[in-house]
Amino acid sequence: MIAFLRGEIADITEGSLVLDVNGIGYEVLVPGQLISAVPGIGQMIKLHTYMQVREDAVVLFGFLTKDDLQMFRMLTGVNGVGPKAGLSILSAIGADDLRFAVLADDAKRIAKAPGIGAKTAQKIILELKDKLNMEEAFEKKLSSVQDVQGVTEVSKSRVVQDAVEALVALGYSSTEALKVVRSVKPAENMDVEDVLKEALKRMAF
């Protein structure tokens, strides 16, 4: 089992990277979002990998973070979701949005991934919902924000989390609370009280 590869990017295609690791070129299938994030040919990179062994081939799937790899493993653990389908989902919405989509019962968001139908999306939600929790989803989202522009994003995420927790304390389900707070789309100048007021208005309709 190959847990990770660290090497020089020798080639970049639409859905894969070729890494030169000590003179050996490894082709690794990667999410589309990773392609736009890599530094470029000739640069060093580390990929956390999943190795699929088939009768006719050995295929490597690579991710920038252990979190992305973990979500990929969870997806491929769902009956009927293979590695290519899992990669398609993570290419379309990413690990953070996938967690929130599952917790909010947002099958339409998951079904936007190429090759993923409504039934498969519902199955993913059904099988993964008990394996995820809202607090961890927010923590993962916050930890993934690392640049200066992310400061506002972190602040907004905390406001959203506090608002959701307040609604849950009022007796609403976590799924219901998450859906309505996300629909508010808090602006930078909105605090928790502002978001709660708007959310409760929407709950009333």
Image: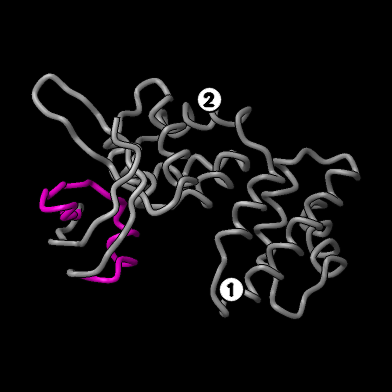
Task: Give the residue at x 65% y 76%.
Answer: 152
Q: Is residue 204 magenta?
A: no
Task: Give the residue at x 75% y 47%.
Answer: 177
Q: Residues within 10 Å of mark 1 (few under 14, many from 20)?
A: few
- State the residue lying farthest toward the front: 22
Q: Which residue has dot 1 on it?
A: 150
Q: Which mark is residue 127?
A: 2
Give the residues in magenta. 17-40
Task: Give the residue at x 44% y 43%.
Answer: 110
Given contact means CB atoms under 8 Å apart, are the residues at marks 1 and 2 in contact? no
Question: Residue 146 in the image: x percent, y percent?
Answer: 55, 69
- State the residue lying farthest toward the right: 170
Q: Which mark is residue 86?
A: none
Q: What element carries label 2?
A: helix
User: Which quadrant of the figure has residue 44?
Assistant: bottom left
Q: What element carries label 1?
A: helix
Q: Is 134 on the left-hand or right-hand side of 69?
A: right
Question: Residue 183 in the image: x percent, y percent?
Answer: 65, 59
Which is more foreground, mark 1 or mark 2?
A: 1
Q: Does the magenta stretch include residue 27?
A: yes
CA gap, disc 1 to disc 2?
31 Å
Amino acid type, label 2: Glu
User: Which quadrant of the figure has residue 8?
Assistant: bottom left
Question: Residue 76 in the image: x percent, y percent?
Answer: 38, 29
Question: Residue 180 in the image: x percent, y percent?
Answer: 71, 53
Q: How crowded is mark 2: few (under 14 residues within 10 Å), some or many (20 or more)?
A: some
Task: Give the residue at x 53% y 25%.
Answer: 127
Nearer-the-camera pick, 106 or 127: 127
Amino acid type, label 1: Gly
> Is 63 located above or below residue 41 in the figure?
above
Badge 1 or badge 2: first in the primary sequence: 2
The image's colouring method is one colour
